[in-house]
Structures are given as structure tokens and as C-alpha cells.
Image (cartoon, grey):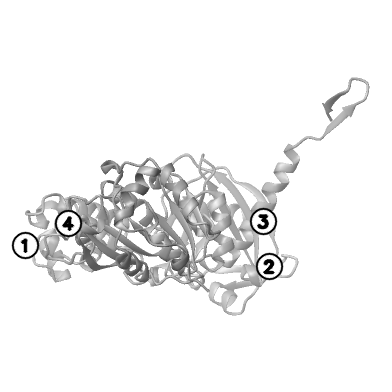
Amino acid sequence: MLSYGERSVAMKLSEMPATLKEIGVSPVKTLGQNFLHDQNLARWIVDQAQITPEDYVVEIGPGLGALTRFLLEKGAHVLAIEKDARLANFLRSRFGDNRLEIVNTDALKFDPRVLFAHRCVKLVGNLPYNISSPLLFKFLEYPSPISLYVLTLQKEMAMRLSASPRTHDYGALTLRVQLHHRVKYLRSVPATVFFPRPDVDSAVVRLESRDPIELPQRDDELLSKLIRLGFSQRRKQLRKLVREYASNWSALASCLNIDPNARAEELSLQQWIALANSIAPLPSQDMCSTPDERFPVVDENDQIRGHASRLEVHGNNLRHRAVHILIFNEAGDLYLQQRSRWKDRHPLKWDSSAAGHVTAGENYDETARRELKEELGVDVPLEGIFRLPASSRTDQEFICGYRGTVSASLAPNKSEIEKGAFFAPNVIDGWTSARPDDFAPAFLECWKAYQRKVQSERKKSIRPETFSAASGAASTA
């Protein structure tokens, strides 16, 4: 039986000009249209992504299909994003494979979050040099559904991404990318392997997502501000650039074992995080723990039968009460929080916008208002939209669910929330279906209940029509 590579003959360099002319493409420098013709290199690049048939692979800028061919040969499903309609049509005619989906769009307009609907996503591509930075930031934005990237970039960019402290290439871009990814410079690539030949050499890098607990908890907003300040004038000493945040620099540098005269490029990522955490200490595990908090213990009918501490309730799986609040923005996107790494249950799982236990002396409505204020710093009208019975899927919680809308920005409580972001409902649908393990189990039940509520509302909004035989027209009942 012929392999895929044998059925789809590799395109030689000598064939490229004629092929491009035939489909009406004159390579445009501003679109980064430099086509890889070295098949051995193409095969090697694909091998670095360790593709399996279970993978969903996104390829940016497939061009004439040099990498596409080998990606399909691995048995993966491939989503190729090609801006040029002529090249997209050429790929469709060249590869008649149902595992290849070609999207004719600008990759900068593609929403990477729709990829959460697939369990294992990898990205491979020869990124156009002129838009490589915005493309990287778009597809690397946390949380990202992509676990591994193998990218061919301008060599200068590749060196900056993979740089180490105390080197010329080390800078704000390095830290921004390495905060959530481990980056490895794989090899340099000469300009001669492309047609037409670019003016600069390239390089291949591999990026792998970090485990969230690999680095300490931190305030990413503050960290980014400090890094931008530190590298705003590379030759200045760091203490002069961050004095607004660290007036006691000498003591701080001594505590962190940093040279008081250090420049930004001398601090490792871990030291930058330590600096941010020293300036604005984050809650510790002890600060986030409230084992003595008392909850009402209820029976199978949600009737109070006594009270017990959080530790007793969770330890003995006693039935108790909770609220879940779904907060939407004006665009209809839902805010999801990633639970703190210090939570006693489901740490770092994604969850409802705000949630919490009903405590002694409270009812559901009072708890919902309190939790919303404590966790997100807002106070907006809330509508009760569903109730769920206690079960193993809700951690034995009777849940009352609420819905609200915000127009102002949120202020997430860092002792409760690791990260947070707004997501379109269709993205959440795909994400919860493909990767349920990413979520707290109770949220999955709440999301199902919310969807049932929405479907019910839609049915009620459609008013049935009746037919009038006398007039021959439809009328609304």
C-alpha cells in the first residue's frame, strides 16, 4: 500500500515557479510568501512536533503544502490557515484528504480559543516574518488550547524567544513568552531553503506549555509592568527604573540575593517573579484556608439539620448549600475563574464566575451577593435561574445558580482566583465537551443547567402562529 507521501509527490524547487505562475501567485514580500522547498527539512520540522493520529494540528501559512504533506502522513487532522485564496484552492486540489480542513482567512483574525473543542492541539508553521510577533501573542495568550508549538521564525526572533539571562537577546519578549512556555532553539535554517530567498536566515523553535504550578503564583499585571520598566532603558540600573514600586531597593535586593546594581537582563524569570511578589505579597495557603468556617448541614430535601465546620463537611461528604454566579459582559461572554492553587478542592480548575458556600445564618440570595463582591469586587443585580440537587457531581452541594451582567471591569480576589477571562458561550460548549477534566465538576453541572434555561427561554420567545382560513394569512396567537 502506498504511503501518503508516495501518493502526494513532493514539489521540487524547479517546479515552484511554474506552479505559482499557473495559479496566478507572484510571491509578495509583505505577506511573507517564501515557500519551503527542502523536503528533508520539512520532514524534520514535522518530526519535532511528535505528531500522532490523536492530534489536532493547526498549520499557519501552509503555502504550497511542504509541511502539510508530512503532517497528514502522521495521521493527524490538520487545520490549515491560509490567507491567500489562490493558495487555499491549490491545497484543496492537491490534497484530497478528509483529514485536511483549509480555512481561507488571515491568521490574525482567527480565534484560537475555538480550538478548546479539541483535546490535544499542536501548532506548526513557517510564520510570516512581518507579523510573527502579533501572531505569537495571539496564539500564546493564556489560557491557550495549544500544548506544543514548532515554529520557523526569523532567526533574530527565535534567539530572543529562547534567550537566557545576561545575553544580548534576553528581554521583555523573552520573559513574556517563557512565563507560560518552555522554549527550545532547535536549529538554524539558511535562506537558501526558501523560494524566493528571504533576506535573512531563519530558525526553528519548539514551545511547550508549562504546568501552572511550575512557577510561583504571582500578579501577572504587576510583573509585566516591572519587566517593561526594567527593559525600557537596558543600560540603566534596575533600581533607578523601578523606584516607583521599590523605594527600599537595597533591602529588597539583599533579601532576594540580587546585585543592588543589577540591570534588567541579569534577573532570571524566577527572580523577576520573586521581585514582584516581594513588592506586592500574594496570599499564602494559610491565608486562603478557613477550616473553621461553619456551614448548614442539610438533608435530602435541603432542610437544615445542623451545622459543621468546612473541614467536617468536606471530609465527611455532608450535604450542604452553595451558590454559583454566572457573570456575562455586554457582548454575551461569560467570565470564568481559574480556582486558586490553594483551594482544598479542585485547585486550578476552571469554574463559575464566582461561587461559594452558604454559611451559618445566611440564605442563598445573601450568599450570592456576598460572594460576588468578595471574589470579583462588583455588585450587580442577580437573577436566580436554576437549582441543582446535592449529588456526587456537585460535591454534595445543593446549588442555587444566578446570572448577572457587568459593564465595568472586574477586580478578582487573588486569594480565591488564580486567573480569569471572558469566553464566548460556544467556546465554553466545545471546551467542556472535549476537556471536562479542566473544570470543577460542579461547574459542568451548572453549565448544563444554564443551557437548559437558555433553551427554555428561546422556546418561550417564539410565539406560535395560527392560520386564519378566512383571510388566508397567518396570525400570532
- Kindly state the secondary structure of the residue where label 1 is placed: loop
Q: Residues within 10 Å of mark 3 (few under 14, many from 20)?
A: some
- 451 or 354: which is nearer to us? 451
Inter-mark Cα distance, 2 to 1: 59 Å
- Look at discs 1 and 4 and give the one toward the viewer: 1
Tell me the tag on residue 390. Answer: 2
- Look at discs 2 and 1 and give the one toward the viewer: 1
Question: Where does residue 193 sit, x and y in percent of width and height?
Answer: 25, 59
Q: Disc 2 marks which amino acid?
A: Ala
Q: Earlier in the sequence, mark 2 or mark 1?
A: 1
Q: Earlier in the sequence, mark 1 or mark 4?
A: 4
The quarter of the picture where residue 363 lies is bottom right
Question: Where does residue 12 sit, x and y in percent of width and height?
Answer: 33, 59
- Kindly state the secondary structure of the residue where label 4 is placed: loop
Tell me the tag on residue 246. Answer: 4
Q: At 69% across and 49% down in the image, what residue appears? A: 453
The quarter of the picture where residue 105 lies is top left
Q: At 70% across and 47% down in the image, what residue appears? A: 455
Quadrant of the image containing the C terminus: top right
Q: Disc 3 marks which amino acid?
A: Ala
Q: At 22% across and 56% down in the image, what residue appears? A: 157
* Residue 445 visible in the displayed image: yes
- 67 or 108: which is nearer to us? 67
Say left or right for 120 vs 243.
Answer: right
The residue that label 3 is drawn on is 449
Q: Are marks 4 and 2 in contact (CB under 8 Å)?
A: no
Inter-mark Cα distance, 1 to 4: 14 Å
Question: Where does residue 254 sit, x and y in percent of width and height?
Answer: 12, 69
Inter-mark Cα distance, 1 to 3: 57 Å
- Look at discs 3 and 2 and give the one toward the viewer: 3
